[in-house]
Image (cartoon, rainbow, N blue to C red):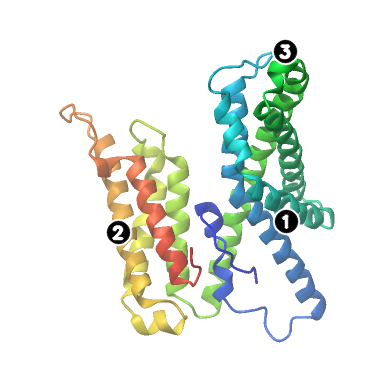
């Protein structure tokens, strides 16, 4: 089984339920168990990198925001923002270099070389390259060496930094997409396995979370939703909520599966709010004759995603993954 790790990214959280699921059974061979252990360790290494990817991309993007991506770097009063942001993360960067990316590269090198393995390796290498270049630039600008050499070294480093970041951004997009796809596939497999073992509560909660997460990925950043396009997912959510609420009321079953009863109830409660928010968005978008007004707070994609985040936190605690 895949080991559970504390996560804050919803997409990753959804594939971590296996820490409380059963094993392959007494008849599983030692070879298969070793293969599974290796796959688990590799997956968890990728999860760790994915967990850090958002923070990394935010930090690395500051160079472009401050110095630009034109032929030459542009020096403004905002330079201090790049110097400070990169300069104050030395322990974080050391962990990324010495542990996180190092582990990914080791696991990927020993893998079957699937698309995900290659994407994880490319992103890890891109992180290490970009980090080395930006740390070098940070030291240069922190010492105000660009004043001494009239920006000569800064111009020399600039093209390489910009090119490295562009490559990193492309590798990040592919890595993220493949992680999301595999995460959902893993979660669906987890649900099947749990049901075979007689579980009801956990797969009901996880099933709802998958549907809600899928819906969240289809919501626009702004504006109204497309009710027709979302109707199949919405109908699936309505069904999943009914199943979740019914089993959440069965405390005996919840305890039997080793879940926290209080948190199971909280998951069911916030799942209802998630569905209500989706209903509000659908109704707002489906009423062309409505008086012109802005959607209410609970009729927006932002509210949906916010509630989904809360539900994810409750779900994690329910299965024993503490933030």
The picture quadrant where one finds residue 314 is bottom left
Judged from the image, the secondary structure of the residue bearing numbered disc 1 is helix
**Reading the chain from its start, which is encountered first: label 2 or label 3?**
3
Q: Quick one: 257 or 284, which is closer to the camera?
A: 257
Instruction: Say which residue label 2 marks.
Output: 272
Query: Is the Cβ of the residue at disc 2 closer than 8 Å to that at disc 1?
Result: no
Q: Is residue 13 left or right of residue 225?
A: right
Image spot of residue 61 (x, y percent): 60, 31
Q: Quadrant of the N terminus?
A: bottom right
Q: Residue furthest left?
A: 291
2 or 1: mark nearer the eye: 1
Judged from the image, the secondary structure of the residue bearing numbered disc 3 is loop
Q: Quick one: 92 or 211, which is closer to the camera?
A: 92
Count neighbours of disc 3 (C-alpha within 10 A) and say few if under 14, some if 14 to 19, many if 20 or more. Answer: few
3 or 1: mark nearer the eye: 3
Image spot of residue 127 (x, y percent): 71, 41
Q: Which mark is residue 99?
A: 1
Image spot of residue 264 (x, y percent): 37, 71
Tell me the CA gap for discs 2 and 3.
61 Å
Classify 322 as above or below 125.
below
Instruction: Say which residue label 3 marks.
Output: 150
- What count of labels does the image hold? 3
């Amino acid at each position: 089984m895949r080991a559970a790790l504390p996560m804050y990214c919803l997409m990753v959280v959804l594939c971590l339920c296996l820490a409380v699921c059963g094993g392959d059974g007494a008849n599983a061979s030692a070879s298969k168990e070793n293969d599974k252990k290796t796959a688990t360790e590799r997956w968890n290494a990728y999860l760790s990198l994915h967990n850090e990817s958002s923070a990394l991309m935010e930090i690395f993007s500051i160079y472009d925001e401050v110095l630009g991506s034109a032929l030459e770097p542009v020096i403004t009063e905002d330079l201090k923002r790049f110097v400070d942001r990169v300069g104050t993360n030395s322990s974080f960067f050391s962990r990324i270099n010495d542990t996180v990316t190092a582990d990914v590269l080791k696991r990927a090198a020993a893998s079957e070389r699937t698309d995900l393995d290659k994407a994880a390796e490319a992103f890890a290498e891109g992180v290490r390259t970009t980090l080395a270049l930006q740390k070098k630039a940070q030291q240069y600008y922190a010492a105000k060496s660009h004043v001494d050499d009239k920006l000569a070294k800064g111009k020399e480093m600039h093209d390489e930094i910009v090119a490295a970041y562009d490559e990193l951004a492309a590798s990040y997009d592919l890595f993220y997409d493949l992680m999301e796809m595999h995460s959902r596939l893993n979660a669906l497999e987890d649900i099947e396995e749990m049901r075979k073992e007689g579980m009801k509560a956990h797969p009901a909660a996880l099933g709802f979370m998958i549907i809600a997460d899928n819906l969240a990925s289809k919501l626009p950043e702004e504006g109204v939703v497309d009710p027709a396009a979302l109707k199949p997912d919405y109908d699936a959510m309505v069904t999943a909520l009914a199943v979740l609420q019914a089993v959440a009321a069965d405390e005996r079953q919840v305890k039997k599966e080793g879940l926290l009863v209080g948190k199971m109830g909280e998951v069911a409660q916030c799942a209802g709010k998630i569905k209500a928010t989706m209903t509000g968005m659908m109704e707002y978008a489906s009423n062309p004759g409505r008086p012109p007004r802005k959607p209410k707070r609970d009729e927006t994609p932002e509210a949906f995603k916010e509630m989904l985040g809360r539900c994810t936190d409750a779900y994690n605690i329910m299965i024993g993954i503490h933030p």
